[in-house]
Image: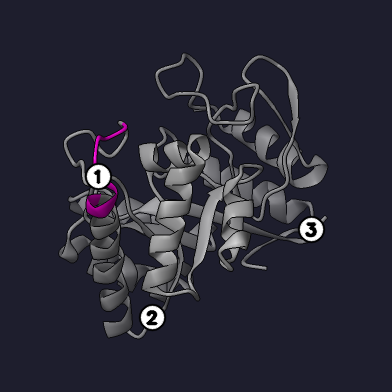
Amino acid sequence: MSRHIDLNCDMGEGATEASAALDRELMRFISSCSIACGGHAGSESTMRLTVRSALEAGLRIGAHPSYPDRENFGRQTMPITPDALCAAISEQVSVLRTIADEQGGKLSFIKPHGALYNDMVRDADLAALVIYTIKYIDPRLQIMGLAGSHCRAICEGLGMQFIGEAFADRRYADDGQLSPRSQNGAVITESETVVEQIMSIVEHARVGSINGKWLPLRAQSICVHSDTPGALEHLTLISNHLIARGLTIGVT
């Protein structure tokens, strides 16, 4: 078992001072963040603010592109042509990378958001399209996606580095995909249960599905969503628990 655990959060998804303040609080407990870059949420203003806060906190910075669907927060599958999707992803990533460069930072990885993330797990052709688009932008960028999915093999086939991600605050279906948010219990809101799930992944490389089935799961990064109710309490308890077990939160 690695003694370093990368914790990540999706950030820059709100447009208020309160949401920015919460992001800064959450940054105290994580090592990576993926920043909304205009597809489902975010603006150049929130990107600049979030990048600045992330650099001050010493975090690894990623882009969080999505279907261009702010109305549904990028959480619904969107009918879109391949060319239009490639253009949308390229625009979102390029804006954030320029902002990071201007502030002396570096864009390290790309983590697709919401429905795009889940659709890539179900559709290998879509996954290949998105990964190839990212490679065209910059082949040095790493791609964060669902651990255990075909996204790893597709990345490796295209010569791209893959970061397998698991989730502390989401339930898994029996097939290893994330349970739909519409399903009762799909989002975990109890901090103790979040800690139990994260420690099962970290220490035993397995996770219990929403129906009680044990699934093998090895991951390089673990996500707590910033908009999950109780996210700050979750991360505080997770951090305390990991440190007590002699583990370090950081990028390996």
Q: Earlier in the sequence, mark 3 or mark 2?
A: 2
Name the residue rendered at 33%, 54% in the picture.
65
Name the residue rendered at 20%, 41% in the picture.
69
- Residue 15, percent across and down? 18, 51
The local crowd at label 3, few if under 14, some if 14 to 19, many if 20 or more residues have their Cα within 10 Å, is few
The reply, left or right, for residue 172 in relation to residue 101 is: right
Residue 161 in magenta? no
- Residue 111 in view (yes/no): no
Label 1 – label 2 distance at C-alpha? 33 Å
Q: Amino acid at mark 3?
A: Gly
Name the residue rendered at 32%, 32% in the picture.
77
- Magenta region, main secondary structure: loop
The reply, left or right, for residue 72 in relation to residue 58 is: left
Q: Earlier in the sequence, mark 1 or mark 2?
A: 1
| Numbered mark located on residue 105 in the image | 2
Using the rendered view, name the quadrant where residue 70 is placed. top left
- Residue 221, percent across and down? 61, 54
Comparing labels 1 and 2, the label whose residue is closer to the camera: 1
Label 3 – label 2 distance at C-alpha? 30 Å
Which span of residues is magenta-colored? 77-84
User: Are dots 3 and 2 in contact, CB under 8 Å?
Assistant: no
Tally of numbered discs: 3
Question: In terms of secondary structure, where does tag 2 sit?
Answer: loop
Q: Amino acid at mark 1?
A: Thr
| Numbered mark located on residue 81 in the image | 1
Question: In terms of secondary structure, where does tag 3 sit?
Answer: loop
Q: Which residue is mark 3?
A: 246
Question: In terms of secondary structure, where does tag 1 sit?
Answer: loop
| Numbered mark located on residue 211 in the image | none
Foreground of the two, 225 or 108: 108
Q: Amino acid at mark 2?
A: Gly
The local crowd at label 2, few if under 14, some if 14 to 19, many if 20 or more residues have their Cα within 10 Å, is some
